[in-house]
Amino acid sequence: MTVVALLSVAPVIEGSMASEVAKAVAALDEFDVAYETNPMGTIIEADSIDELMAAATAAHKAVDGDRVSTFLKIDDKRTHTYEAKEKVESVERELGREARKER
């Protein structure tokens, strides 16, 4: 996969956004993308920018509300194929440990 993105879609509401965020995440299932949700957003991997943009657009449209806020950060590495986990593994090699700490 060559296109990796961080997607965050949320309705601008008071209270829990979980049910609306779940709709955005579920919308990704209709596309040929890999994804992993974390507390701050969802990492998406796709073979093309077109597939990634279609998935992100569907996620945005899946959220109900008078106002929806979407953040999309794209890393479109065009020189070779890679996976998102490789980016984390590179940082962990530099650290000499996992890039994680529990409180």
Image: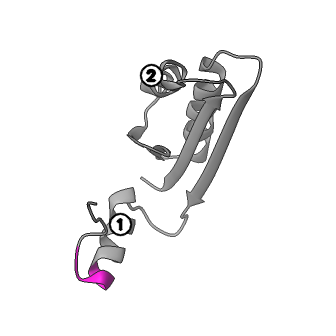
How far across and down, in percent of the image, does residue 2 sit?
A: 47, 56
Residue at 48% in and 24% down: 18
- Specify the farthest residue to the left: 97
**Position in image of residue 49 (x %, y %):** 59, 46
Q: Nearer the viewer, residue 67 or 30?
A: 67
Please give the residue where the numbered disc 2 appears in the rendered image.
26
- Residue under the point 56% across and 32% down: 55
Q: Label 2: state its secondary structure.
A: helix
Q: Are marks 1 and 2 in contact (CB under 8 Å)?
A: no
The residue at 70%/16% (across/down) is 65
* Residue 13 image position (x, y, % from top left): 67, 24
Residue 25 — which label? none
Q: Which residues are magenta?
A: 93-97
Question: What kind of residue is marked 2?
Answer: Ala
Front residue of 103 and 62: 103
Of all residues, the one furthest to the right in this rendering is 66
Q: Is residue 57 left or right of residue 18?
A: right
Q: Is residue 29 visible?
A: yes
